[in-house]
Image (cartoon, coloured by chain):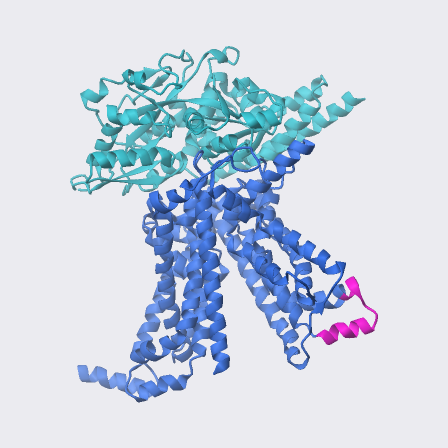
Amino acid sequence: MERIIRSVRSRLEIKGFDLNQFALFLLLLGLLCVLILYPILRVLYEAFTQGNGLTLKHFLNFFQRDLFREALWNSLFAGLMTVILASLISLPLAHFMVRYDFRGKMLIQTLGVLPLVMPPFVGAIGMDLILGRSGILNLLLLRWFRITIPFMEGLQGVILVQTLHYFPLILLNAKVSLKNIDPSLEEMAQNMGAHGLRLFRKITLPLMIPGCAAGALIIFVKTVGALGAPLMLDYNRMLAPQAYLSGDDKSRYVIAVILAMISLVSLWIQRKYLKRSEYATAQRGATGVRVAKRITGWKPTMILGLCVLILTISLIPHVGIVLLSFAKRWCFTLLPEEYTLSNYAEILVQVPHFVRNTMVYCSLAAGIDIALGSVMAFLLIRGRIMGKGLLDLIATLPMGVPGMVLAIGYLKAFGFLSSTWFVLVIVYSVRRLPQMLRSCYAAMQHVHESMEEAAMNLGANRRRTFLKITFPLMIRGVVAGGLTSFIGSSVDFSSTIMLVTRDEYSPLSSGIYLYTQRAIGWEPAACLGVVAIFLVAVGTYVVNRISRDRSEAASKV
Amino acid sequence: MAGCAADRDEVVIVTSFPPDLYETYKKAFEARYPKITVKIIPKNTIAAMKHIRDTASRPDSDIMWATAVDAFAVLKEDGLLARHVLPKEIAERIPSRIGPYQIHDTDGAYFGFALSGYCIVWNKRYLEAYELPPPKGLRYLTDPIYQGHLGMCAPSRSGTTHLMVEVILQRYGWKEGWKTILNMGGNMASHTERSYKVSRGAIRGHFGVGVVVDFFVWSALARGYPVGHDYLPVGPTLKNAKKFIDFLPANIGLIKGGPNPENAKRFIHFLLSEEGQLLLFKPQISRFPVIPELYDQAPGDLPDPLKTPVSGGKFDINLSQQRYELINSLFDQVVTFRLKELRKAWEAIYEAENVTGTILDEARSLVSKVPISEEEASRLALIFKRGNSERVQKCETEWDSRAKKRYKEAKELADQAKKIGGK
């Protein structure tokens, strides 16, 4: 018997078929189907069936309801407005930063990324403290002019929070695009008499659009499906809050499908645009490098002033959160009446489980991601199996499906899991798998196949080669990917809030939410927010360091 | 089979109470029974009920612990609570009634463990800044001067708010009750997602006035916040409302088929024992025990609910239980989700205030009515009780569009009245 198996196996191996690899492939495929495909299909099933038959009735019901139509419209409107406002902030900033050289530029460049370390649900709390009904600004307005301005009320509050969080995405993309634009194109236009705004509108902006579109689409999708900011601001007339509040209704699944569609369509558009933008970059190699204009006189002061103004506004949430985290009592006064360290003592010493759970869940999720991502990258690059692209496709799905939709699917598909904490680990790892797979894939492409062949010539089998040669060579990229996964999970609000059941299982993100529901003694929410910001900031810094070292190392080789 | 299994070393509690309360009891109970761990599932009352219903075939929790008595009545009616007889030494120290409210369920499905009343709470600094008088009394809440200064939670998100709405409806009748509620809606600044946020909003000065359960006030005062309060008087009629105060029991009940019934009983007995009852006086909890003898030991500034004249009004818990889901949904459709339109309509009416005439009266009556009568409500109640269905969605859609239309018409009428008056 054993001989037969061995002979079959060896014959297959001659044809380039590896049984172990195939088993691994099947195992992974099964796992992905259960953890990704099934919950998503379950959402679709719930949205499109009634009893045993297929139906569109739930969608009809949805669109017949004024409330839902309004929620849909509000969500789309908020997405669009956020993109527009974020562009209005980012484009001038990017222009000044790339085209001019002035004192304080480095500082502004660093500050410009800071909003990204502040998750929107934390940002909403911070901004409310400064711009809200009883925030610093409105108290001053009330005192001086007897008026208040409803910055944070309703939809505009959500738009403001989202804009201030996400504008750096456009800023970063815009800066890259601006740098990549061939100076000769603009020079030609200038020779023909186009200057100033006309030059910008006709030449520069169209050339920047493909690059910025990627950032804009991400912002749009994130805002349309926003849950954290609306919940924190008590605004429920948007899609995600309606799905959160509606319980196990059909409308919840309809909303989930709509959110997923919006996200998938955006992803598709993005792919199309990215292809076109290759055209713009293809020209770049041929031209010289543009030198930033050194400017003097009153101009740099004005530009600096403008940049500082914009960035000061974008740091409002940070200021609010830090102030609150040290506040003992803060009630209708400009600044807290009394300061204390006891809020930090509470979340670090007395009730440490929020921070601890985040560390545990996110580490486990990152570990799972590292394992799955590197093995899958290996199969995708070195594997010789038909249909391996299927793995890639399913693993990438969570990128196109909002976290909330996945969570809704999990609730329906694995109800039994939802009373454990492990469901959070699984969802976190699934959510970050697409990015992780990309990191591992890129890391693995850096490993030349000849190294593996050398190891195998020396007698190591595939597994040993992978563990001893391939993986250690990939490790920098993998660690960077794992850290990114950790950061993402630690501030994941929408799926956490849907899935967490018990107080003791709650990680930091839902811990913040729990604290904000307290009437008195909610200040520790701000401390948890500070911890979240700290984790994201340090994590991002380390990832950047690793990536930079890696590219330096690569260039030395 | 499950019933025979020995308890694990834990007791799982679903509760709508804030951490200040459950953490205190968790610590005290675990100190008393070092082998048992208390596990908490924090949910608002409505979500807690849903959780218990969803897990009924295999309950993962032992105890439901929340304020609103009618929520327990619903759970009992659905057969989700286990009956239990308190030991004599505990039962004999607790009176059977307070005002119209039975302290314990007569069948032993749930037990009152603390008393609390509803308060109007306001932020002194806020009212000062906006130059508003303190709103002492329910009628103030419908006064135009408080427009945009009132905070409230939706009954579908808060069991205590639900109970308050139901009390108003039962005391003043369906018509007058909704009129009051819709008029309050016109004054609302915002709807909060949970009742705690009403208190925080008032305490922080997010809005000036809120209606909350009294213990929020006591604990805010204990922490030195500048809040004022007045017990919400819901007397038998609107006119002599001022004289009476309602104190309601907050409750605890055993979930049927829970995994640790013995530990759960221990917890309930602990809560109702002298030791457990005295914990209620802690400043972060600030509730009133159900054992009257203990009031001698109350901290200075707490009133004695057993000595306050309680209202003679009736409260029909059965009626409340029957239409529980319907009221939640109706309120959401006509107030929560249409708050903007409702506010705009009232704003327009207030602006035309000096004008008298039929047009304005018509506008007023349009924003004072709900789309269905009490009889229709009781007919539809069962459909809502059975859960989400097409019928439910149809009703909701209809109420929503009718409310929207009415508020719009009312605004137009009021605008028209203003124009005529202006001439």
Q: How far from the left and from the top, in percent, is residue A408? A: 43, 51
A141 over A274 or under it: above or below: above
A216 to the left or right of B66 = right
Answer above or below: position of A298 versus A452: above
Left or right, A31 with respect to B211, comes to left
Residue range corresponding to the magenta coloring: A183-199
Residue B52 position by quadrant: top left
Which tint is chain B?
cyan
Front-lying residue, B279 or A13: B279
Q: What residue is rendered at 38% in x and 64% in y? A: A369
The answer to whether residue A413 is seen in the rendering is no
Q: How many marks?
A: 0
Relative image position of residue B301 (x, y in whole percent): 40, 19
Q: Which chain is blue?
A: A
Q: Main secondary structure of the magenta part?
A: helix
| Depth check, front residue: B359 or B203 | B203
Q: Position of residue A125 (x, y in %)?
A: 52, 43
Instruction: Tell me where residue B262 appears, x and y as whole percent.
Output: 19, 35
Placement of the N terminus of chain A among the 4 image quadrants: bottom left
Is residue B376 left or right of B131 when viewed as pictured?
left
Whether residue B195 is in magenta: the answer is no
